[in-house]
Amino acid sequence: MSEGRDDPPLSAEEELALARLALDEGDLPHAAGHVAGALAQAPTLPEAHETLARVASAGGGGLDLFPLHHRAFVGAVVARAHLLAAAGRPAEGLELLAAATGHDRRSDWAGVPWVTAPELAERLDPERTAGVLMQVCGALPDPVPRAERAPLRAYLALARNAAAAHPEHGLLLGAASALARRLGEVALAIQWAGRGVRAQPSKLGEVWLGYAYRSAGRTRDALAALRRAVAHDPDDLAVYADIAGTLGDSGRLDEALEWVDRALARDPTFDCAVHTAHRLRFQRDGDVAHLVALADFVRDHPDDSHEHGDLAECCRSRPWLGQVTPAAGAMVEALRRALAADHRGLGAAVRLETLEPPSAMRTVEAAVPGLRVEVAAVAEPDPRQPRRATDQPLWRYDGTVPAPTVPAPSAEAAARVRQLAQPAWPHPPAAYDAAVGLATLDLTDLLGLLVHPPPPPATALGRVLAGQDPSLWVRCVQVWACLGLLHHRTDEPWAASVRRRVLLELVWGVEDWITEAALFALVTAAWVDPSVRPDVVRVVAERLADAAAVARDRPVPIGVSLAYLALATPDLDPGTAALAGELISGRPPARRRRNPLRRLWHQLLRRPRRRP
């Protein structure tokens, strides 16, 4: 279905006025088009239905004026549905309204008298009604958000009427229960599903009853119903996964995994069982290897029976698995305090024991003009120097003041990243896929975005970030720019690729938020391509070890974030995982005794090479 013409939309009233003019001139196709436009915007408007009736009367029923094409306009689909009902074919009309709901569930496509009339349910074949209700359910989340339920009430009225007209029809009662459950009518869902299994015991009826009990929080009753479903059909492995999921949600992980293992013993590739198994095992021990294995399974089995949310559920709100970690350090803490107090500088000052990441310094300078920054000393190892030699540094320093070395990105690059950059994503492979929108940007643009982040967009999220934590927006831009680097020249083999070389230089450049963003891009590459995992694991281990060594001598504001990145890395070795745990817990290795000669030696080794 489509949203209609590319022209600026007219109001429903304007569409109807044009429809009447076309009717008066005998131009039925144009009249039909304008009526469809009015219905798309106001599907329950009485005047729209009156004008539709006039068009139908003038056009011999009007069905030919609203044909179904491959990309049918939703307003035309709805108009045809009403004309089918008027022509004595309401079941076909209901199916088209359900399709419109699948296209946009927030519009009240079915809120018209003929759908909610009790006599309709009496005339319809109950199996056909059940099919319509299941079609609607297939387009809805479970549960539907409360604010989105009102446009769906007409279908619930249809279900009530049908349940009253056919009180012993198991399939209809089960489908009605599924709809009621999604719309928050849990008690009614239990009542209908219970009636259905008493009238016609079946596996599907018990599943519907089990879901209804589960929505009510009655876990014991839900499990009993689902076990009865297994007794009806021991070969339906989806029910095994449902039982496992219900047990897992109630904290009974060992029992849940027993059911999953029973399903996997029958079919090791059954998608529902595989997804549930990895989710439950991750819940049990927190090992990211389960999520990586699940991502591998999803990649290798693109034709699963239906969409699953287990991977996204496990990654949600977890550092780097599902979101950017907030920046740490004295500068961003000062920024957050200033913004919380609505204090934009005005002679205020912040004193730093040593330099902080250049992105932090620049972000605070832009967000709080006039804030004086005093740096007590430049601790060793010097944070102004790259951790390893680099051919293209992004920062230069005038004393303790950082400045970019690369030009600002193009307006097109800034616009694209403003559309894509967000602080959260479902899981690393999803972030990789979303960043493909940056694939055609030049390398210069991608690097420019890292040190010249554009302002946040004028959206609700952008306004929140600009007002409460500009540092998070800067980190979003850097993360997505580095993900864009992953899509740069993807035809090049990984080992000798430009994208790998540039990301490594960013990882080992000046200690900065960009370090985290580049390392996240490498970790993401390991998620989506198993062949690069050994390379990425080596880089992550070396970079974390370096951060831990530096932390013995001075603060490393990005250290904890690097540790979380390590724990998100596929195939990470146990030693690096243990080191990451130490950094996260705040127990870094004991501080070394200072040795001026050794410190000088390391400085000489790390001095950047000059290109000939």
Image (cartoon, rainbow, N blue to C red):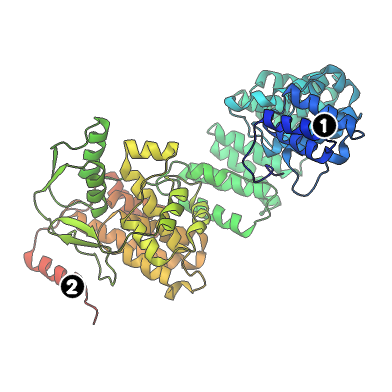
Reading the image, the residue beneath label 2 is 605
Q: Is residue 564 left or right of residue 75?
A: left
Work out whether residue 261 or residue 499 is closer to the camera in this orientation and state it.
499
Reading the image, the residue beneath label 1 is 24
Q: Quadrant of residue 571?
A: bottom left
- Three-letter amino acid code at the position of disc 1: Asp
At a point 23% along the width and 65% down the height, the residue shown is 386
Q: How many marks?
A: 2
Q: Is residue 208 left or right of residue 549?
A: right
- Can residue 329 be seen by looking at this rendering? no
Q: Is residue 287 left or right of residue 250?
A: left
Q: Is residue 437 above or below residue 128?
A: below
Residue 162 location in percent, x, y?
82, 22
Give the alpha-carbon distance from disc 1 to disc 2, as whole Å. Answer: 88 Å
Work out whether residue 454 or residue 434 is closer to the camera in this orientation and state it.
454
Q: Quadrant of residue 465?
A: top left
Q: Is residue 459 above or below residue 507?
A: above
Q: Quadrant of the N terminus?
A: top right
Q: Quadrant of residue 268?
A: bottom right
Within-10-Å neighbours for mark 2: few <14, some 14–19, many 20+: few
Within-10-Å neighbours for mark 1: few <14, some 14–19, many 20+: few
Q: Closer to the N terminus: mark 1 or mark 2? A: 1
- Which residue ends up furthest to the bottom in the rendered image? 612
Residue 60 location in percent, x, y?
92, 34
Q: Is residue 571 left or right of residue 236?
A: left
